[in-house]
Amino acid sequence: MPYTVNKTQHFPYAPQVVYEAAKGAMEGLEGTLQEDKPEEFKLVAQFHKTILGKVLGDRAWMEVVISADGESSSKLDLTAYPLNAVGQKLMFGARKGALATLLSWFDAHLNHRLPKENS
């Protein structure tokens, strides 16, 4: 897995719904919000080495921007990468699987917070 992960997902929900779910997912994973811009549907969070009691081994940075993708659907653009001890982007030496684990947990938390039926 490359150090910087760029990912796009589409959801059959309004941007506000996806934004609230993404914010809840970041907070649920013990991320520290660095930016929270509800008017732009943008979130930026920093994650510690230990999340929910599990040591992942690397700190991480995640940026999420949600935009309208039709009348009642939205697009989530995510960028994530590992950080070194002083909060700089890690260019080498990242722990294998740490970022992938965080991203899979984020997906699970995000989908759990979305409505079960599109209403």
Image (spheres, helix red, strand yellow):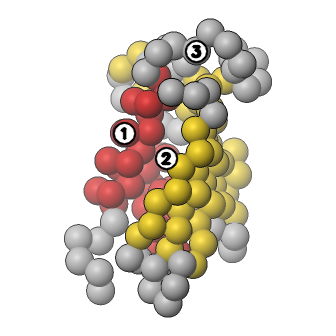
Pick the residue in front: 46 or 65: 65
The answer to whether 94 appears left or right of 114 in the picture is right
Crowd band around label 3 with a 10 angstrom C-alpha radius: few (<14), some (14–19), many (20+): some
The single residue placed furthest to the front in the displayed view is 1
Judging by the rendered image, the residue that carries numbered circle 3 is 94
- Give the residue type that dot 2 points to: Met
SS at mark 3 in the image: loop
Can you say whether 14 is above or below 86 in the image? below
Q: Can I make out residue 20 in this image?
A: no
Can you say whether 71 is above or below 45 in the image? below
SS at mark 2 in the image: helix
Q: Residue at x 29, y 56 (%)?
A: 112
Q: Position of residue 91 (x, y in %)?
A: 72, 19
Q: Residue at x 76, y 24 (%)?
A: 88
SS at mark 1 in the image: helix
Which label lies toward us, 1 or 2? 1
Q: Where is residue 37 in the image (x, y as percent from the top left)?
A: 69, 63
The answer to whether 114 appears left or right of 43 in the picture is left
- Give the residue type that dot 3 points to: Ala
Asked if disc 3 and disc 2 are in contact, CB closer than 8 Å, the reply is no
Pick the residue in front: 94 or 26: 94
Marker count (numbered): 3
Question: Which badge, 3 or 1, is on the more N-terminal residue?
Answer: 3
Judging by the rendered image, the residue that carries numbered circle 2 is 26
Q: Residue at x 41, y 44 (%)?
A: 106
Question: Which badge, 1 or 2, is on the more N-terminal residue?
Answer: 2
- Give the residue type that dot 1 points to: Trp
* Residue 105: assigned label: 1
Can you say whether 101 is above or below 27 in the image? above
Mark 3–mark 2 distance (CA, rounded to whole Å): 21 Å
Mark 3–mark 1 distance (CA, rounded to whole Å): 18 Å
